[in-house]
Image (cartoon, rainbow, N blue to C red):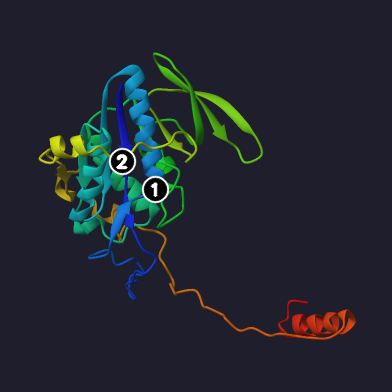
Amino acid sequence: MQILVCIKQVPGTSKIDVDPVTGVLKRDGVDSKMNPYDLYAIETALRLKEQKGGKISVISMGPPQAKEVIQEAFMMGADEGVLISDRKFAGADVLATSYALSQGVRQMGNFDLILCGKQTTDGDTAQVGPEMAEYLGIPHIANVLSILDIKETSILVEMDMANTIEAAEIQFPCLLTVEKDIFQPRLPSYKKKLSTKNREIRTITFNDLEDKNENRYGLSGSPTQVERIFPPSVNTDQQTWTGTPTELSFQITDKLKQLKFI
């Protein structure tokens, strides 16, 4: 089974600057980590490989420093890693990101199964996986809770439908986004770190892609733009009131009216 896992490097802190012009995060020099949800996708791939054999590849999109999360994936058991990196991809929204990733996948070859984490902690849109599948022209299922069965040409899964849990069978090749409760991710292996420290990580740039229409990538290919980003305001004002229950109830009511909550 040929499995591809999409992973992403995200900020490891909430203290991160935003470009005031483009509205995108300034990632250079910021402590980063692998998107936590992607760890569950990697673990799912490893469990499937243990059952059915095959090869696990990982793909990430970002600056050169994003190779660090690919190396972490090697330490968990991934076999191959590819980084999509080019300044032309900078500032991409979910649509442009999905398209660039789909183009990168086409350069890597054919896969039976593509796995993504449910969402990323820096965007929280949960849209990239399904949009990738649409660009690749393959079926997809989101919010997968468990793998029920793996057949020769299909996979049977349980998915979270908010009010219900439903089972569905989907034909290969396909894409799944997995929930964080699907499996407990294993820790990176120190032995694998030593044995894979010199493993090549292929970089795919804009010039390597089949579609070289610059209007499909980065800020140019992003139909959504950030209008304004600002830190949440911190309100530490406190008031202490004393009195009888009746007096306190009137004070609370007056305060709520003053704040225009009622």
Say which mark, if any, is on residue 102: 2
Residue in the image at 12% along x and 38% along y = 199
- Would residue 164 be seen by someone viewing this image from the given angle? yes
Q: Quadrant of residue 11?
A: bottom left
Q: Which residue in the rendered view is the most extreme toward the right? A: 246
Q: Residues within 10 Å of mark 1 (few under 14, many from 20)?
A: some
**2 vs 1, front mark:** 1
Q: Which residue in the rendered view is the most extreme toward the left? A: 198
- Give residue 149's position: percent from left, percent from top: 47, 18
In-image side of 8 versus 139 (left or right): left
Residue in the image at 28% along x and 61% along y = 31
Residue in the image at 51% along x and 78% along y = 233
- Would residue 212 be seen by someone viewing this image from the given angle? no
Residue type at mark 1? Pro
- Give residue 95's position: percent from left, percent from top: 38, 51
In-image side of 55 versus 129 (left or right): left
Q: Secondary structure at mark 2?
A: helix
- The residue closer to the viewer here, 133 or 152, is 152
In-image side of 142 versus 239 (left or right): left
Residue type at mark 2? Ser
- Give residue 26's position: percent from left, percent from top: 29, 67
Q: Which residue in the rendered view is the most extreme toward the top? A: 152
Q: Distance from label 2 to label 1 (Cα)?
A: 22 Å
Q: Quadrant of the C terminus?
A: bottom right
Residue that numbered label 1 is attached to? 36
